[in-house]
Image (cartoon, grey):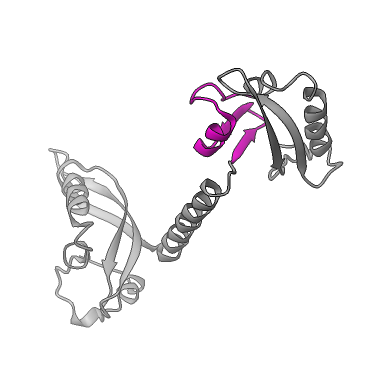
Amino acid sequence: YYYSDTTHRMFGVEKESLPYNWRPYEYLTHPDDSEKVKLAVDQLLAEGKKVALSYRMKKSDGSYIWVKDYATAVEKDQQGRAVKVIGTFLDITREKEYEEKLKESEKRLQLAITNSESGLWEWDTQTKLFKISDNSRKLIGITKGSFETVSDFTCRLHPEDADRALLDLQNHFEKKTDSYISEYRILDDSGNYRWLLSKGKLIAFGEDGAPL
């Protein structure tokens, strides 16, 4: 077995203090991740399958870091079993910590939305798909699957409000307003109209400046 100096520094171990057959994925893997790591390593050795796996490993100080492990068999025997393997460890701890913070923020946002009579919506102007949160569906009074395209939205607008609501949207697309704000009535599944205050903002543009 050979491990680079960077690998030793990553785990906080001295190269000279390790046995020649040191295998960090066996000794340092977090208990909750050990089963999936063992399965991936077994498949790599027995079948030559590539490994691309994220898991936690313990440092010499007892703390854990997240690593992305890429490994592939560069030499196999006649049965397809790995004879020589090369791989890399990437420290992705910061990325994982950011993901966890983002998940927590999303949970808090969803809780705030649920308790504030508000809902989220997203419109992909390229695919024309319209996505709304479960809380939005509840507020509008529609069932799942019946509000997935822009036409599903426009056909529910009250005839007296449709032109104004679409004009407000067009003005924002043409960058005449900093954000989209519009009040209109929309038809729910029971056949009644509900008043909504809708707000939005473009967040992506193409090279030509057109909204994405």
Q: Is residue 76 left or right of residue 125?
A: left
Does the magenta segment cover residue 17?
Answer: no
Which quadrant would the C terminus be assigned to in this image? Answer: top right
Q: Relative to the observer, which residue lies in front, 148 or 19? A: 148
Q: Relative to the observer, which residue lies in front, 104 or 9? A: 104
Is 138 placed above or below 177 here? above
Q: Relative to the observer, which residue lies in front, 171 or 153? A: 153
Image spot of residue 74 (x, y percent) = 27, 48
Residue at the image point whose x is 60% and y is 23% from the top? 188
Q: Relative to the observer, which residue lies in front, 157 or 191? A: 191
Q: Is residue 156 left or right of residue 49?
A: right
Q: How many marks?
A: 0
Residue at the image point whose x is 48% and y is 26% from the top? 144
Residue at the image point whose x is 82% and y is 24% from the top? 163
Is 139 placed above or below 143 here? below
Image spot of residue 185 (x, y percent) = 71, 27
Magenta-drawn segment? 120-149
Residue at the image point whose x is 45% and y is 65% from the top? 94
